[in-house]
Amino acid sequence: MSTVPYTVSAMKVFFRSRKLFPKKRLGQNFLVDKNVLLSIVDAAAVCDRDIVLEVGTGTGSLAELLGERAGRVLSVEIDRDLFNLSRYALSSRDNIHPVNMDILSSKTSIDPRVVGILKEWLRADKGAVLKVVSNLPYSISTPFIIALLESELPVELMVLTLQKEIVDRLTAGPSTKDYGVLSIIARLFCVTQVIRTLPPSVFWPQPQVESAIVRLEVDKEKARGLMPDYELFSTIVRTTFQSRRKTLLNGLLRLKGFSDGAGADANKKALQDVLKRLGIDPCIRGEALDLEGFLELTREIRTLKGEENG
């Protein structure tokens, strides 16, 4: 019989009996509506050929439901207390593998131990599909999503519960306040669908904000085809938004190789010519460019850099 709590009252007893409290600094707001949890598993269409990564095991409620359908589940929990509790609660499921660590080894990288485990599982099961299904801790949402998309892991689908503010950034279009690095990188790699919004009442403790479930269909092969020099693309996007208040031209002048004081005038002229060829006004801000605009800009700058190096 399951010892995982699925109601607010059961959750409170679960914590009180162990003299524990939710940790605000870790963003511990637990999803306690089982119907919502089941809808997350349904949205991911989890089946026995799937390898699933879950981030933030919590009390084990989502992990347990994933384990009922998935081939294997790797569930990562940073909090030692919750890891010990959820490992015990999930011990009857031999296809759920809880680990106690931070999913991120840095702000831009998935912990290599997680990558290693998942790659080993994928090698052992050639037909497996890698999915990420998680009530994601809000404090790491943006860096985790970007790090996962930029990693070598062949993830095909993500279904995530996120703070509505993060969802707005994921789905934002050019020249809006929420548009930024996350919007563009997600658009390169994914087709994003908002499944449903969630009120604070389905969590314990209740957060001060709304949340939403999103489904991201990931196609890394397509992304690589659109942008073979992803490192340069990422650098241009990040540099542009680090200089959000600057014009596009002035932001691009901060790129490595273009910020040389000795050749400043020549570099500026070269970038002006690039923007002119693309029909882009150098006085606009970078946030006005859509994904295709950034892709075209990267291709032109890559060519320019090649000419200079040649």
Image (cartoon, rainbow, N blue to C red):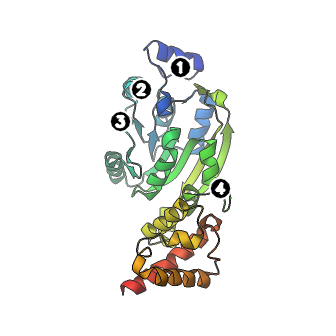
**Residue at 68 percent of width and 33 percent of height:** 199
Disc 2 designates what residue?
82
State which tag comes first along the sequence, 4 or 2.
Answer: 2
Instruction: Check residue 179 in the rendering and tell me which mark sits there, or answer none.
Output: none
**Residue at 62 percent of width and 44 percent of height:** 165
Determine which quarter of the picture holds residue 104.
Answer: top left
Q: Residue furthest front?
A: 262
Disc 4 designates what residue?
172
- Seen in the picture, residue 117 relative to 93 is either above or below; the reply is below
SS at mark 1 in the image: helix
State which tag comes first along the sequence, 2 or 1.
Answer: 1
Determine which quarter of the picture holds residue 6.
Answer: top right
Disc 3 designates what residue?
99
How far apart marks 4 and 1 lie (CA) works out to 35 Å
SS at mark 4 in the image: loop
* Camera-nearest label, 4 or 1: 4
Residue 114, given in percent of the width and then of the height, sits at 35, 45
